[in-house]
Image: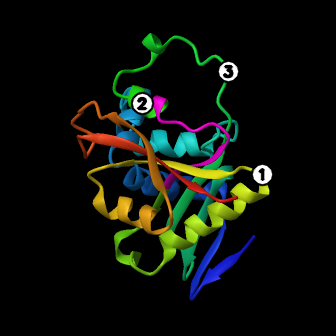
Amino acid sequence: MQNRLGSVLFRPARKEECRTIARLYSISSDGLSDYIWTTLAGPGENILDVGERRYSNEDLLFSYKNCLVAEHEGEIIGMLTAFPMHLPGNPGPAAEIDPVLRPYTILEKDQSYYIMGVAVFPEFRGRGIGTRFLELAAGKALEYGLPQLSLIVFEQNVGAKRLYERYGFYEIMREKVVPHELIHYTGYALLMVKDVC
């Protein structure tokens, strides 16, 4: 699959692009990925190395295999990570979940095409790239026979929330953010969905 928006090419990600994907995911998660990667880092390991390692792991849902990238003049300028969300029948005891991460595990929509992350480097924003990623995600949801897109956004991230609302997303649930120095926002995290069929 290759789609173009002017001089921007949208295509599946490649394994050698995992470090750039990790950089973009760090932007999209507003510090949440930095927190997760810090908990997984080995002694002296840079958190971006952790992100690259995780995106390189083809056994994980959020591997590069579930990423699309936007390319301009041979450079990656944006990415979308998304996959079908099928929740297990018995998620296990909630007590075992890291309290900082707990709100985001609650904010999951079964039988949806989950947009885990979408980001564009700052100098390329405002060109319709984020909207095109959402359109491509909607097409994938239809391919999988899933009725909705879903995503989580911080209520205080006004720009991202506005983009999603313009594209037809609406809030169905919210959870209070557990403050942490690496996470950019406080307040509430919102689960938003868009009906695609």
Query: Does the segment drawn in magenta span residue 112?
Result: yes
Farthest bottom residue in view: 6
Could you tell which of marks 3 and 1 lies nearer the N-terminus?
A: 3
- Seen from the viewer's position, the closer of residues 183 and 136 is 136
Q: Which residues are magenta?
A: 106-117
- Asked if labels 2 and 3 touch by Cβ distance under 8 angstroms, the answer is no
Which residue position is annotated with label 1?
A: 145
Residue flagged by tag 3: what amino acid is it? Gly
Closer to the N terminus: mark 3 or mark 2? 2
The residue located at (43%, 63%) in the rendering is 165
Q: Which residue is mark 2?
A: 41
134 lies left or right of 44: right
Distance CA(mark 1)–CA(mark 2)? 37 Å
User: 101 left or right of 138?
Assistant: left
> SS at mark 1?
loop
Q: Residue 16, image x and y in percent?
A: 62, 57
What whole-number distance in Å separates the C-alpha atoms at marks 3 and 1? 20 Å
Up/down of 9 relative to 42, above or below: below
Could you tell me which residue is drawn at 53 percent across and 36 percent down? Answer: 108
Q: Position of residue 87 (x, y in %)?
A: 64, 30
- Left or right position of 157 against 120: left
- The residue beneath circle 3 is 89
Asked if 134 appears above or below 73 in the picture, the reply is above
